[in-house]
Amino acid sequence: MMDGRTRERGQALPLVALVVAVTLVLAVVVVGVADAVIDRAAAQTAADAAALAGAAEGRVAAERLAVENGAVLVSFVPGPPVEVVVEVDGRRAIARAEKRLDFGDR
């Protein structure tokens, strides 16, 4: 004779499998988004550094700073303001900078 507990045996297994599958999918999505955010931040940092170097010392300095930050200088438009485009792992970033002379309060 079967009681109520016997018929329900194993019913939690499909639910546990579903929870595990959803958790794995969410983890993959979170890791993908985190990688994209990190790549974007790295590209913007490299672009900012290259633009500042380019405004101060020109294209050669901009390219050097881009490479030091793991980027490739895609374009350099002399200014003012200097505009650079760099690429890091397929992510592009644009930055502008200009050199200003500050003589302080006189």
Image: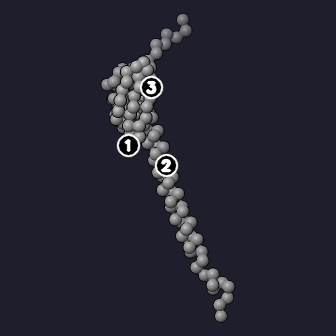
Residue beneath disc 1: 89
Residue 87 image-quadrant placement: top left
Where residue 80 appears, as percent x and y from the top left, is: 42, 18
Q: Which is nearer the eye, 64 or 32?
A: 32
Determine if residue 99 is in view.
Answer: yes
Q: Is residue 104 placed above or below 36 in the rendered structure?
A: above
Circle 3 residue: 96
Distance from disc 1 to disc 2, alpha carbons, whole Å, reads 14 Å
- Which badge, 3 or 2, comes first in the chain's sequence? 2
Quick one: label 1, few (<14), some, or many (20+) residues within 10 Å? few
Which mark sits nearer the N-terminus, 3 or 1?
Answer: 1
Kindly identify the amino acid type of the residue bearing the numbered disc 1.
Asp
Structural distance between the alpha carbons of marks 3 and 1: 21 Å
Q: Residue 36: give x, y in percent of width and height.
A: 46, 45
Residue at position x 46%, y 38% from top?
Answer: 41
Asked if residue 55 can be seen in this view, the reply is no
Q: Which mark is residue 67?
A: none
